[in-house]
Image: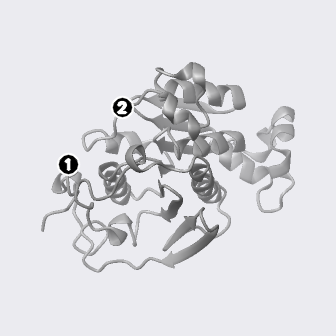
Amino acid sequence: MSELSLDAEQLDRYSRHVIMDDVGPEGQAALLDGSVLVVGAGGLGSPVIQYLAAAGVGRIGIADADVVERSNLQRQVIHGDDDVGRPKVDSAAEFVAALNPDVTVERHELRVAPDNVADLIEGYDIVVDASDNFPTRFLLNDACVLADKPLSHGAIYRFEGQATTFTGGQPCYRCLFPEAPPEGTVPDCATAGVLGVLPGVVGAIQATEVVKLLIGHGETLEGRLLIYNAADMTMETVPLQPRPDCPVCGPDAMQSLSEADYSESCAVPE
């Protein structure tokens, strides 16, 4: 899509982008031509989907196998009370359709797994990890490194959140966490809780990273981990260094997802 193909309604809808020198009609056209896969339509996925759709990202894939529960509504803002019991991909798609008719939503009502992840990410420019479990995080990282695909990562816990961006090279998520912590040592949101507004902040950061990648402007969080603490309202960034022996992005990297275990430790055996 070229800048000249923006019609009058689009020029009105995206006027605050178009008047920015760093975005302009060319940048908006790039957003409308862009495609993003969001894995997870829950706490993090909700603001990511909401803001990418509002920004005019032309094609958004949503992968999630869960249904809406009433306990989700405290933070998962694209779902409503009438959606309880419905697949999250369906209520998310309806939300996007009501927000921006320019956006095409592709529903993937499934759990991302080693046997489907490569085909799933292949058709998208960028992948967003809005999942809530370590196996999915490691799987998305490994698949995106192998496919040389940018990945936006986010995670939340009680009052704390983190975000970073990996672009398919070094460092990757396994440079930060070589393998998953032992089962039961890190409580999830269902057992430890999460501040309802926290995923809105972290998810908005992830959406910002995606928009910058699509329009080719600004500096992303590549090589840095942003840590946000809502309790004392602080943000800091920690530099990430590539691990020379990383089994995914290092010189002796694995060649196939079959070389890793995504059931427990998510380790890549030597």
Location of residue 8 (image quadrant): top right
Please give left or right for residue 159 compared with residue 113 in the image. right
Task: Report the amino acid beneath label 1.
Answer: Ser
Q: Which residue is mark 1?
A: 263
Drawn side of residue 122 relative to residue 126, left or right: left
Question: Would you place residue 151 above or below residue 113 in this image?
Answer: below
Quarter the N terminus occupies: top right
Q: Is 153 in front, or is 20?
A: 153
Where 270 sits versus 192, above or below?
below
Q: Tell which circle, 1 or 2, labels the residue nearer the N-terminal end.
A: 2
Q: CA distance from mark 1 to mark 2?
A: 17 Å
Q: Is residue 34 at all visible to an observer of this figure?
A: no
Whether label 1 touches label 2, CB < 8 Å:
no
Residue in the image at 61% along x and 58% along y: 205
Instruction: List the residue tagged with mark 2.
Output: 110
* Place of residue 66 in the rendered image (x, y in percent of width and height, measured from the top left): 40, 30
State the residue in front, 119 or 13.
Answer: 13
Position above or below: 190 against 90:
below
